[in-house]
Image: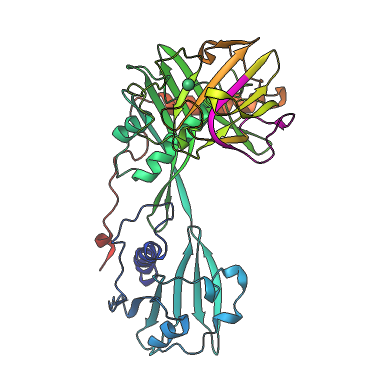
Amino acid sequence: MRLVRLSVVLPVFSAAAVFATTGGWRWRPFAQPVVPPVVERPVVIESVTETLDTLRRGETISHLFARHRVLDLDLSGLDPALALHPRRLRPGLVFSFRKSGADTLPTHISVRTGPEQRVVFRRAADRWDAVVEPIAWKAEDVRIEGAIDNSLYEALDAQVGDDLLDGGDRQRLAWDLADVYAWQVDFTRDIQPGDRFRVVFERLVSEDGEVRFGRVLASDLMMSGKSLTAFRFETDGRPAFYDADGSSLRRAFLRAPVQFRRISSSFARARFHPVLGIARRHEGTDYAAAPGTPVMAAGDGVVLRAGSAGGYGNVVEIRHRNGIVTRYGHLRGFARGVGAGARVGQGQTIGFVGSTGLATGPHLHYEFRVNGVARDSRRMEVGTGTPIRAGLRADFIRERDRLLRLLQEDTPRAIVRQPTEPADRWLP
Ligand SMILES: [Zn+2]
């Protein structure tokens, strides 16, 4: 019984340690993020006492250990694999000291050192043993769906509560979903009122109760009555997304030369996005983004020019196959190595958003030209993607059908809306 209770109680403390350690880790705190310097909380569970203590600013770990009368634990001799090098220890790191009833000194010390591990010290006869204990994360499939009335951010925000993913992870979900459709959909301008989405994604829950976003598994976008399904599938260990027929979603041209994740949510409002430069004859698409935002080559090609050209300001032109040229204007500057004659690959950074030339504010002016004529890249036939190779087709179909069932289930799967257990519940 004692062991069982411990295994429940301890994770709560270890989780608290995490939040004090780094605010930036990718999970959501469910306990108070601020841990007082010393929690003399004599949690007596059948004669086991646990005390939490925090590494203070300017203090060495020896000081901290000394407070608990641990004088014989030499961290400098530890295996570097433990990732507990004294110099890397930050103030706020929380240690748990445990001792059994009869002991006067701790016999067990643990500290959470990362999302995937904790380090545990156990007192042996005359020395301390240190081991790394992996943290188990369990994946849950979650299905959500809804309308995209304004922006993808807002649509996901409305469907995913704080109890499911925190704000940062909702944003990651939006980014990853936009990446899935990087060749088909420009989420900053293609969305129309009435468009809908369905997504099945993984939500990871650790044994300590932390939550984080995993990955998109499948999705379905219904845009202007057309359905764009995507299924995640790995070939040779490399994940990619495929349509229901097993063709890759990858195409020769990205739908937009600026990543959705680089365009702030205030710019990513589909319906209210201001189109800049409407006063003059306009042969391209404008992307409002912060100065310095990376601009990507929309497809593989060769740089025709990278320099200053009148109203375009700093401009890059890339020649692609089939008489296609893409043009990127108003750049603040060019990426290293991008000059006439340079070969560039799809997605490669070629320059940075600026407001050079005739620009009312920082934005990218993007043109897609076919045989010298500017075309709306949205209306271009994008063709079909490379089909999955024959040897993997049966595997793909199996996985597709599994994901399709998850995607189409009427009732929300798994734990949509299940609140996180309050930490108090586990305390005696
Ligand atoms: Zn423009």
Q: Position of residue 289 (x, y in %)?
A: 44, 34
Q: Quadrant of the N terminus?
A: bottom left
| 295 relative to 324 in the view: left or right | left
Residue 261 horizontal/vertical position (percent): 46, 36
Q: Quadrant of the C terminus?
A: bottom left
Visible in this render: residue 186? no
Q: Tag count in the figure?
A: 0
In the rendered structure, the answer to whether residue 318 lies left or right of residue 291 reads: right
Q: Which residues are magenta?
A: 326-347
**Residue situated in front as seen by the camera: 33 or 99:** 33
Q: Which residue is rendered at x = 38% and y = 66% of the image?
A: 17
Seen as rendered, the residue at the extreme right is 341
Q: Residue furthest front?
A: 310
> What residue is rendered at 39% in x and 15% in y?
279
- Relative image position of residue 377 (x, y in whole percent): 54, 15
Whether the magenta-drawn stretch holds residue 252 is answered as no
Q: Is residue 369 above or below residue 301?
A: above
Q: Residue at x 34, y 25 (%)?
A: 410
Foreground: 397 or 23? Answer: 23
Which residue is at the front of the view, 95 or 76? Answer: 76
**Is residue 399 visible to us here?**
yes
Q: Quadrant of residue 192?
A: top left
Q: How is the image coloured?
A: rainbow
Asked whether 384 or 183 is in front, the reply is: 183
**335 in magenta:** yes
How far across and how far down the image is residue 274, in percent? Answer: 36, 23
Is residue 315 shown above or below 68? above
